[in-house]
Amino acid sequence: MKVSIYGAGNQKFYLEELKLHEKLGGEPPFGGGAVAIELAKAGHEVVLAEPDREVMDEELWKKIEEVGIKVVEDDVEAAKHGEVHILTRPCSESTIGSIKKDILQHIPKNSTIAICSSTPVIMIYSNIERELRLERKDVGLVSMCPNAIPGTGMYSRYIMGYRSLDGEEYSTEEQFNRCMELIKSINREVVVKPIDLVPLITGLPAHITTVTLSGILNYYRMKSLITEDSEKVSEREVLYVLQAISAILETSGIRGLVKALDMDLLIENAKASRLLEEQEDLESAIHVLSNLSKEFSKEVEKCEVKPVSIVASQALVEEIRRTVGGAAADGVISRCKKKFLTS
C-alpha cells in the first residue's frame, strides 16, 4: 500500500524534554518516524514529509532512510504519492492550511486522511468542510490514534473510528477498512470506537477524561453514603456542573473560568468536602489549584466573565428539532457545531 506520513516527530523534544525513553521505554525515533519505519518494514511504500530536518540527528534519519523510506520536505510531493495519508502533526492553523492547500489539492482519488493524534476528526472536518464538499467528496477522514506515542514501550494498539455517535460517516466503510488493514499489517491491535469518542480516551485529553470521571465516580460514592438521593438526582448535579463549566469556558476561556469560580472560595469548599479516604484525586486537584503561578493569576484578574445560559446541550438540540424541524433544524445544529469546532 502507498502511504504518506506527515511529520517525523520532534525527537529532540521527545528525548531531551520529555525523556520518553526513560519514562516509557522503547527506542527513538518516536512518533511519525516510528510509524514510518514499521510500515516500511511491513512492505508498504512509505513517503515521510518533514520540512525541518533538525527535528532529529543524522543517525536517526539514517535509521529511517535505510529501511527504504523516501524523506521529502514538501507536503505536495507526499500528497501525490499515497492512498492513505497519516497526519501525525498537532492540529494548528498551519496544519489546516497544509491540508487545504497542499494535501487535498494533490492526493489521488478516493484517498483517506488518517488523523494519528487525539485531535477530533470532526474538528478537522469542520475546518475543511467547504473543500471536501465542493472539491473532494471522494476523500475520507478517519481517526487512527495510537494508545501511546509510537516507538515507546506502551505503544501496542490503535483506537480507530469513522462513524460518529449520531450516525454521520466521515469516510466510506471501504476507506476505513483499508486503514484497519494497514494497522493490522504491522501487528498492532485495532479498537473501533465512535469517532467523537476517540479524543476522550487517547493522547493528552485522556488526562481530562480520567480526572473528571474519577471525580464523578467518587462523588457518586460519597453521595450514596451521606444522602439517600437517587442516582438520577446525582446525575443531574454532575450534569449541571459540567454544563456550567463548559458554558463559561466557551464564552470566557480558561482564565475567565478560573475567575468566575473564585479559586480561594473553591479550594476552601473543596477541602470541606474531603470525607472519604479514597479522595486522592481531590487532594491532587486542591494541590494544583493552590499553586497557580502569580503570572497566571494576574492574567485571570484582567479577564471578563461573559454572560451564559446554562442549558443541557442535547436537550437544546432536541428542542430545536421539535420546534423548528427538518432542514432548518439541521442547518442550525450544523452551524453551531461548526462555530464550536472551527479554529
Image (spheres, rainbow, N blue to C red):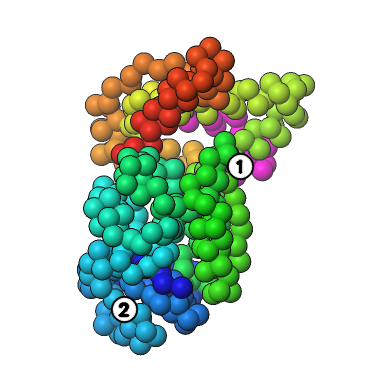
**Which residue is at a point 46% across and 73% down the rendered structure image?**
1
**Which residue is at a point 60% across and 27% down the rendered structure image?**
238
Q: Nearer the viewer, residue 156 or 301?
A: 156
**Which residue is at a point 49% across and 38% down the rendered structure image?**
286
Closer to the chain start, of discs 2 and 1, is: 2
Residue 326: percent from left, percent from top: 51, 20
Residue 135 vertical position relative to residue 190 in the rendered view, above or below: above
Residue 211: percent from left, percent from top: 54, 43
Other-residue count near label 1 (Cα within 10 Å), few / some / many at <14 / 14–19 / ≥20: some
Can the viewer see residue 30 in this picture? Answer: no
Answer whether residue 220 is magenta in the image.
no
In the picture, the disc for residue 51 is none
Residue 28 vertical position relative to residue 263 in the rendered view, above or below: below
Residue found at the far top of this picture: 323
Write down the residue under mark 2.
70
Residue kind at label 2, given as amino acid type: Lys
Residue kind at label 1, given as amino acid type: Ser
| Separation of residues labelled 2 and 1 (CA atoms) | 45 Å
Q: SS for tag 2?
A: strand
Left-right relation of 65 to 247 = left
Which image quarter holds the C terminus?
A: top left
Magenta region: 266-281
Q: Nearer the viewer, residue 85 or 25?
A: 85
Write down the residue under mark 1.
214
Residue 186: image quadrant is: bottom right
